[in-house]
């Protein structure tokens, strides 16, 4: 059974509040989403296994902890998930990176796939799946389907803001994955945008509106 963690760290909350402000421009928004992703990654990866290895310091021999276990892959959901990748790679620079391209139909709000390129041997890896927004949950559920279809059994989904509707959908469809949320907002509006949310994350990261 996976867990859901709401990351209530004050630094994460402060930075998300800055992201919400409609006066925050593209440059600052991009920096903030990367910083939030790094802080969220720090918390989400606190259960990575370590093993003791021998090291000789300038002073003495010692047994010290080093990461062990599954290798990592970061698989952002395009486009907006791209904004979180560098923040996570700052923590785990040798992770492989895949991409899942999904866009939401403006009328039906259903996700449509336009690209999928995943690292090999995903069944051997822990996959971190970042997307700033979990709204209806359709995009995240489909992305997890793609990753599981490659045999992956260990997935951590990470979003900056979630709507209760999307969180419930993802927990119901994929109860085995871990979900990390920066802020759990109030609801979706009639256009399936998160309220209060921060608007269209992709447009705000890439300056396309
Ligand atoms: C946004 C967001 C998620 C999706 C969330 O992407 O980045 O992928 O919507 O909505 P859902 O939970 O209802 O599926 P969008 O489709 O706007 O594409 P973009 O990242 O290219 O802007
Ligand atoms: N996608 C976004 O970028 N924002 C929302 O509020 C919902 C979906």
Image (cartoon, rainbow, N blue to C red):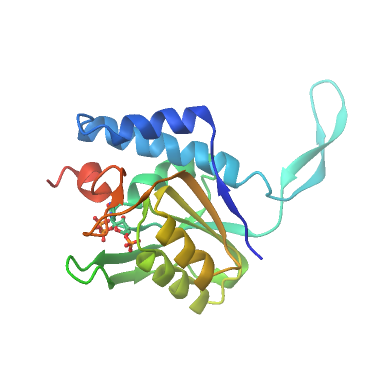
Residue 132 image position (x, y, % from top left): 37, 49
- 118 above or below 64? below
Residue occupying the point 51% across, 45% down: 93
Residue toward you, 19 or 169: 169
Residue occupying the point 20% across, 68% down: 105
In this figure, what is the number of numbered marks? 0
Left or right of 118 on screen, residue 207: left
- 73 above or below 33? below
Residue 66 visible, this orientation:
yes
Residue 56 image position (x, y, % from top left): 82, 31
Quadrant hosting residue 92: top right
Residue toward you, 141 or 124: 141
Residue 94 image position (x, y, % from top left): 53, 49
Residue 75 visible, this orientation:
no
Residue 71 image position (x, y, % from top left): 61, 58
Residue farthest along the left direction in this orientation: 209
Left or right of 187 on screen, residue 154: right
Residue farthest along the top direction in this orientation: 59
């Amino acid at each position: 059974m996976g867990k859901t963690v709401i990351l209530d760290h004050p630094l994460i909350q402060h930075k998300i509040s800055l992201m919400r402000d409609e006066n925050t421009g593209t440059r600052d928004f991009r920096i903030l989403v990367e910083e939030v992703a790094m802080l969220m990654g720090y918390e989400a990866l606190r259960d990575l296994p370590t093993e003791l290895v021998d090291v000789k310091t300038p002073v003495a021999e010692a047994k010290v902890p080093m990461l062990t276990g599954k290798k990592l892959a970061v698989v952002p959901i395009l486009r907006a998930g791209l904004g979180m990748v560098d923040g996570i790679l700052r923590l785990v620079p040798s992770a492989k990176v895949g991409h899942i391209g999904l866009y939401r139909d403006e009328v039906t709000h259903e996700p449509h796939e336009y690209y999928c390129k995943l690292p090999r041997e995903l069944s051997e890896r822990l996959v971190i799946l970042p997307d700033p927004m979990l709204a209806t949950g359709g995009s995240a559920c489909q992305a997890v389907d793609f990753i599981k279809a490659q045999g992956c059994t260990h997935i951590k989904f990470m979003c900056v803001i979630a709507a209760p509707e999307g969180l419930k959908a993802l927990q119901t469809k994929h109860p085995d994955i871990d979900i990390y949320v920066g802020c759990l907002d109030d609801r979706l509006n009639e256009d399936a945008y998160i309220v209060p949310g921060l608007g269209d994350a992709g447009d705000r990261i890439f300056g396309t509106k």
